[in-house]
Amino acid sequence: MNSSIVSRNLLATLKIKMPVIQAPMLGWATPAMAAAVSNAGALGSVGIGGMKAEDARVVIRATRALTDKPFNVNVFCHKRAVSDPSREARWLEYLKPHFARFQSRPPDTLRDTFSTFIDDEAVLAMLLEERPAVVSCHFGLPEPAAITALREAGIVLFATATNLDDAARIADARIDAIVAQGSEAGGHRGTFDPAAADELLGTATLVRLLARESALPIVAAGGIVDGAGIAAMLALGAQAAQLGTAFVVTDESAASAADRAALLDRQSRTVFTKAVSGRLARGIDSAFMRLGQDPACPPIPEFPIAFEATRALIGAAKAHGSSDFDVRWAGAAVQLARAMPAAELVALLMRETFDAIRCLKDEFAR
Amino acid sequence: MNSSIVSRNLLATLKIKMPVIQAPMLGWATPAMAAAVSNAGALGSVGIGGMKAEDARVVIRATRALTDKPFNVNVFCHKRAVSDPSREARWLEYLKPHFARFQSRPPDTLRDTFSTFIDDEAVLAMLLEERPAVVSCHFGLPEPAAITALREAGIVLFATATNLDDAARIADARIDAIVAQGSEAGGHRGTFDPAAADELLGTATLVRLLARESALPIVAAGGIVDGAGIAAMLALGAQAAQLGTAFVVTDESAASAADRAALLDRQSRTVFTKAVSGRLARGIDSAFMRLGQDPACPPIPEFPIAFEATRALIGAAKAHGSSDFDVRWAGAAVQLARAMPAAELVALLMRETFDAIRCLKDEFAR
């Protein structure tokens, strides 16, 4: 078997016409969105991180029912958390006054109830049966045997890197393309070791570093919302751009009216926090985001243990009609997002990309 | 008087041929570097932040002696620090073991001995006499009267923005162009209010947001080291790119052999710290960078008060032959820097920029 089934020409391998990938945003992306994007000639995605195999199969089949084009299924490959009861107890104690606002109490303990693809054989077996065109991996890599099995099933594999070291591990693991996730990206950073010092490389810098240092095709992700952004990433050597926030406000998104209003509010600003889940993630500024910035904030439990407390606090707030603790992951260029059907967005992005390249050539090429 | 003396065509206004600005890196940039860059058709810069007027005049005259082309002089416009003796005492106490390694003690107190252009009338008077083509402002804006005086002297004014709010203040202040400093940039972030929540916008995202939202010309800064990076920023709507780290390793730089070796080491990684000066800055990972990441690290004194302790600690280390606490500001794409004469780098950057645009057109334009 060839060492990589993806040539430098990623679009040809994926059988897509446009260098655009809709990000597999868990909670926002839907089968309707992924299918609309794939039908429009780009690559749609759905996320199944943390889902049970049979629930994930329903999502994949729902997507396939709407398109016969290739699409991408995203899995979470984080290491299992090591519980630290005293740290978790301090965190729950710290959250007490916030729960008290909603006449509620934090749970007594926190457990890791979130699955990881690394040890989920049922999800692997389901993927080998369903055979989506692409499987993309976040937070790390699958076990070598799973990589081999997925490749032998003809599935193209992507993995996320936020730095050069993770990219080198991806290149060693017989993955077909690197999703270069810059610090502008909304949601969770896919860094393999969340405890390591984070260079916080911006998308342009990370893409350029990887295009120069890695033999694998690069997909640029983070802060890209229009055709000028796509053209810039192609100039840096990316073979495609992955857009998330741009698609959250499309008609096919699972976003609520309140979510859409927050994302489309030009005054919205995004910040990083670890307080929601234990891992660094970017979202619209909110009460949750500010918890982690409080100087009195104790160490946050490991990912995904902290998530359990978050779910409880959101639930307590909602039960009292408050959306103060709502979490809305969004990328740093959220102010440029535009509401429309997903297929229209794909077509617009391509027109804008060609226009940007033509302008650049007319103004600067000799 | 027109509301802006800079048209959308920044290069024509500046009378430069190439959309490249060498960043005014205090400590690294030299008159020889700025002159070489300006003589090669781009815009050279020198930094005079914190200098006395007569010392700064020497730097400007030394540059002018080497070029009759336009160049840029950078000033620091930070607000004066408010001393907090108990916070400063805690910081000095925290640094004690580090000083003790070098048989030394921290200073008894810290004072703000670093000047700011905001209240330095002698530097303003000197600039009005010397009339450099461009004055660029970091950390904030000069007083309105100083802006008026500089403009009436025919000086083109730049100011740094790291976010949309600072950019709006720049646009209201009759400044001619915005230096969009992304989170990849080496050295100090120019954010006006260092205590505000920091979105940490990457260069590509910030440039795209400002190109869409601001009427002023945009100069992209942060993580740009080669022509592909310049082409990408032009595609995003920037009119020029400002490069720092790329020039630190040129022949004309004030960097020592050890500095150059550290920057050219492909294993080097950059991180953010506030521990050096009290403001967030990016540099090569070192003992100083790690101080701020220590969970036991107390609140760091305000900028530039913390700088006094830093100078003392570097001095104590050096007196014992240690470079452990050396500070080497560098941008996130430091791995792509190349050693050569500055004029050669300017010529190479332009060839690469044209090549990148031609490739993009050939591969993707219809």
Image (cartoon, coloured by chain):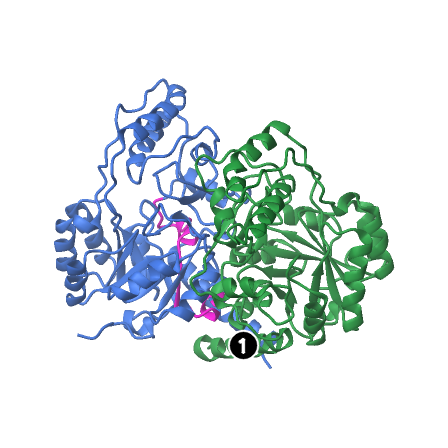
Chain colours: A green, B blue
Query: Which residue is nearer to you in this view: B111 or B357?
Result: B111
Q: Is residue B360 left or right of residue A215?
A: left
Q: How many marks?
A: 1
Name the element at disc 1: helix
Task: Please identify the quadrant where the C terminus of chain B is shown.
Answer: bottom right
In the rendered image, the vertical position of residue B159 relative to residue A76, given as above or below: below
Can residue B247 be found in the magenta stretch?
yes
Identify the subunit bearing mark 1.
A
x and y, in percent, of residue B212 in the image: 42, 70
Q: Which residue is mark 1?
A: A352
Indicate the quadrant where residue A241 lies.
Answer: bottom right
Circle 1 residues within 10 Å: few <14, some 14–19, many ≥20: some
In the rendered image, the vertical position of residue A232 relative to residue B334, given as above or below: below
x and y, in percent, of residue B144 in the image: 18, 60
Q: Is residue A237 left or right of residue B80?
A: right
Residue at the farthest bottom position: B366
Residue name at image x 32 percent, y 30 percent: B87
Residue name at image x 23 percent, y 73 percent: B3
x and y, in percent, of residue A110 in the image: 65, 36
- Can residue A148 be seen in this snapshot? no
Residues rendered magenta in the picture: B231-254
Can residue A311 be found in the magenta stretch?
no
Query: Which residue is nearer to you in this view: A314 or B190?
Result: A314
Give, as a three-letter code, the residue at label 1.
Glu
Residue name at image x 73 percent, y 55 percent: A48
